[in-house]
Amino acid sequence: MKDSTKNKISGNAKEASGKIKEATGKMVGNPDLQDRGTAEKIAGKVQKKAGDVEKVFGQ
């Protein structure tokens, strides 16, 4: 499997996990968990974009 594909898959997983943490933090009133979820969600989006860039440049 190409690195670009791995980055996109891993990014999707991080983004989904972050969304769950973010929602759980909101639901239970834990701002720390909510913030960690938001950060993980953003990291997942960045990793997906990195996979897109790798694919474009063929690395």
Image (tube, grey):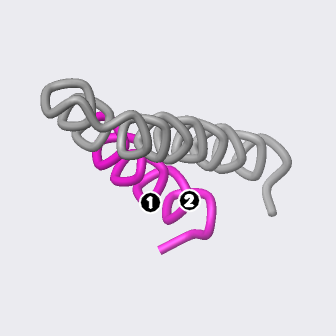
Give the x, y percent position of residue 53.
77, 42
* In front of the other: 55 or 34: 34
Identify the image quadrant of the C terminus: bottom right
State the image quarter where residue 22 is shown.
top left
Question: Would residue 35 appear left or right of 16 to someone viewing this image?
Answer: right
Relative to residue 9, is residue 53 depicted above or below? above
Say which residue appears at 47% left-offset and 74% top-offset: 1
* In front of the other: 33 or 49: 33
Question: Would residue 35 appear left or right of 34 to someone viewing this image?
Answer: right
State the image quarter where residue 52 is shown.
top right
Say which residue appears at 71% left-offset and 47% top-offset: 50
Q: Are marks 2 and 1 in contact (CB under 8 Å)?
A: yes
Q: Secondary structure at mark 1?
A: helix
Specify few, some or many for label 2: CA neighbours under 10 Å numbering under 14, 14-19, or 20 or more. Answer: many
Give the x, y percent position of residue 18.
37, 43
Question: Would residue 18 appear left or right of 42 to someone viewing this image?
Answer: left
Say which residue appears at 66% left-offset and 38% top-offset: 49
Relative to residue 7, is residue 40 depicted above or below? above
Residue 9 painted magenta = yes
Say which residue appears at 47% left-offset and 38% top-offset: 41
* In front of the other: 58 or 36: 36
For mark 1, what is the residue? 10
Specify few, some or many for label 1: CA neighbours under 10 Å numbering under 14, 14-19, or 20 or more. Answer: some
Residue 7: give its label. 2
Q: Secondary structure at mark 2?
A: helix
Identified by mark 1, the residue type is Ser
Identified by mark 2, the residue type is Asn
Q: Which residues are magenta?
A: 1-19
